[in-house]
Image (spheres, rainbow, N blue to C red):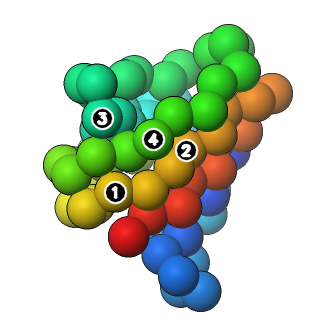
Amino acid sequence: MLHVTLCRAHEPLFDGRAGCVVLPSEEGDVSVFEFHAPMLCALGRGELLIDAARFPVQGGIARVARNRVTILVT
């Protein structure tokens, strides 16, 4: 399982475990599963998915490392 933290400004939107995260990167959707390679990516406008939960985003940044996904969105 992944540990996912999603924040907007100083407002936490999600903090918990998930099996899959789909990030709307500027270059297309990126699916993140357990044991994903470390990465840092810029997010574009779209819909971020954490399992079945959907979050509309206008942009931001995501970091994936050691089964942790940290996402800061606008």
The residue positioned 54% from the left and 61% from the top of the image is 72
The residue positioned 61% from the left and 33% from the top of the image is 40
Using the numbered discs, state the Cα–Cα distance from disc 1 to disc 3 in whole angstroms. Answer: 8 Å
Task: Answer left or right for 28 relative to 72.
Answer: left
Q: Earlier in the sequence, mark 1 or mark 3?
A: 3
- Mark 1 sits on what residue? 59
Q: Are marks 2 and 3 in contact (CB under 8 Å)?
A: no
Q: Earlier in the sequence, mark 4 or mark 1?
A: 4
Using the numbered discs, state the Cα–Cα distance from disc 4 to disc 3 in whole angstroms. Answer: 6 Å
Q: Earlier in the sequence, mark 2 or mark 3?
A: 3
Task: Answer left or right for 7 relative to 35.
Answer: left
Q: Nearer the viewer, mark 2 or mark 3?
A: 3
- Mark 2 sits on what residue? 62
Q: Earlier in the sequence, mark 4 or mark 3?
A: 3
- Mark 4 sits on what residue? 42
Instruction: Name which residue type carries label 2.
Output: Ala
- Mark 3 sits on what residue? 26
Q: Are marks 4 and 1 in contact (CB under 8 Å)?
A: yes
Give the secondary structure at mark 4: strand
Instruction: Name which residue type carries label 3.
Output: Glu
Q: Are marks 4 and 3 in contact (CB under 8 Å)?
A: yes
The residue positioned 37% from the left and 23% from the top of the image is 30
Q: Nearer the viewer, mark 4 or mark 2?
A: 4
Instruction: Name which residue type carries label 1.
Output: Gly
In this rendering, the answer to whether 71 lies above or below 11 is: above
Relative depth, front residue between 36 and 3: 36
